[in-house]
Image: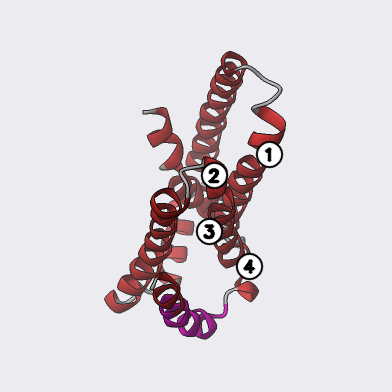
Amino acid sequence: MPYLLLSTTGPLMQAWYARSFTSLMPYRLYALSNLASMLALLSYPLLVEPYFPVFEQAWAWSVAYALFVLACLGSAWQSWNGVSSEVERSHAAAAPRPAWSECLLWVGLAMTASILLLAMTRHLTQDVAPVPFLWVLPLSLYLLSFILCFDAPRYYYRPGFLVALPIGGAADRLAGH
């Protein structure tokens, strides 16, 4: 349950951030979250696991989770007190709803990244070796793609990604045979 609550707060925090700071882009928080995940992934086997027993890791995680809950409550309070209905209406009126085709493309692109990560994980565990350390490189690349796409619009060049997607799929297909 704590993992579910922790992993689903991203969109909520972005909405609160967008309401409180209307001139700033909330997606940078998603890039920052993925950067923290990548740093944790890369540092855990080298800096945490060898030097801290599991009990101390669990205690530190519990304290960090409690601090996270307090930060969420503080953000909720600030968002609740800092938003007027006029600001919400003007912000909502400024952005038209995306078309269904656009929404389906977003879901498809997000699903593609997850499918590719799952395919790579399956390949590594069934065809190469079930060594968890082998997952670090593909998972790091996966997180890096989210960092670059959500940090700033200048990193995301849509036509380039749309061209690279079938090329990457074809290369994966050829490498698998």
Residue 94's image quarter? bottom left
Q: Earlier in the sequence, mark 2 or mark 4?
A: 2
Dot 3 or dot 4: first in sequence order is: 3
Q: Mark 3 points at which residue?
A: 142
The residue type indicated by label 4 comes to Ala
Please state which of the two labelled residues, at mark 2 or mark 3, is closer to the viewer. Answer: 3
| 164 falls in the magenta region | yes
Check the image and name the residue furthest to the left: 100
Q: Main secondary structure of the magenta part?
A: helix
- Residue that badge 2 annotates: 82
Residue located beneath label 4 in the image: 152
Q: Residues within 10 Å of mark 1 (few under 14, many from 20)?
A: few
Q: What stretch is highlighted in magenta?
A: 157-170
As measured in the structure, the alpha-carbon distance from the residue carrying label 3 to the one carrying label 1 is 17 Å
What's the residue type where badge 2 is placed?
Answer: Gly
Q: How many discs appear?
A: 4
Q: State the image coordinates of residue 77 (x, y, percent, origin top left).
A: 51, 34
Give the residue displayed 47% in from the left and 64% down from the top: 91
